[in-house]
Image (cartoon, rainbow, N blue to C red):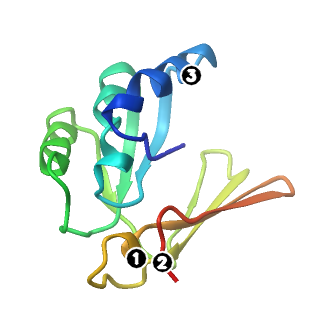
Amino acid sequence: MLIDAGDSSHAPAVVRYLQQHNVSTINTVMITHPHKNHFGGVLSVIDTFKVEKVFINSDLNAEEGYVQLLEELKSKNIPVRMISRGIFVSDKSDSVQIEILHPSRLISSTNANSIVTWIKFQGFSCLFTSDIES
């Protein structure tokens, strides 16, 4: 799973890092919210790797380029799923548990609508908060 991909200037480093770790397929790309510094590098990722699905929130208050990214995902037949609080996702082996903690509903601030994810794997857990506000 890749959570955000930085802006387009970060894309070469993200792609290089994944290639150095022999990644060929990314099961899930999560775009926490539609700001360029979170989704801008995703185009390079989907052009370089097989991506099985993309998770987004349903915030339409997007920066320039987001609609084009969604159109590119559609043209590549990459499923896009809108997720919100209460969604549980697990990997194919059920060894990784992913719980979406936020947002339960969208409000006026794009940052406050960021997807917050709690990932658990074999006694390890990590909370990914993106740009969530108080």
Residue ID for mark 2: 133
Q: Position of residue 45 (x, y in %)?
A: 37, 29
Q: Nearer the viewer, residue 113 or 57?
A: 113
Disc number for residue 112: 1
The residue type indicated by label 2 comes to: Glu
The residue type indicated by label 1 comes to: Ala
Extreme right residue here? Answer: 123
Disc number for residue 41: none
In this view, 72 is above or below 31: above
Residue ID for mark 3: 17
Image marks 2 and 3: residues in contact by CB distance under 8 Å: no
Q: Which is nearer the N-term, disc 2 or disc 3?
A: 3
In this view, 84 is above or below 34: below
Image marks 3 and 1: residues in contact by CB distance under 8 Å: no
In this view, 33 is above or below 101: above
The answer for how far apart the CA atoms under marks 3 and 1 are is 29 Å
Label 2: element kind: loop
Q: Which is nearer the N-term, disc 3 or disc 1?
A: 3
Disc 2 versus disc 3: nearer the observer: 2
Q: Quadrant of residue 126?
A: bottom right
Q: Nearer the viewer, residue 40 or 57?
A: 40
**Residue at the (45%, 67%) spot, across then down:** 115
The answer for how far apart the CA atoms under marks 1 and 2 are is 5 Å
Image marks 1 and 2: residues in contact by CB distance under 8 Å: yes
Label 3: element kind: helix
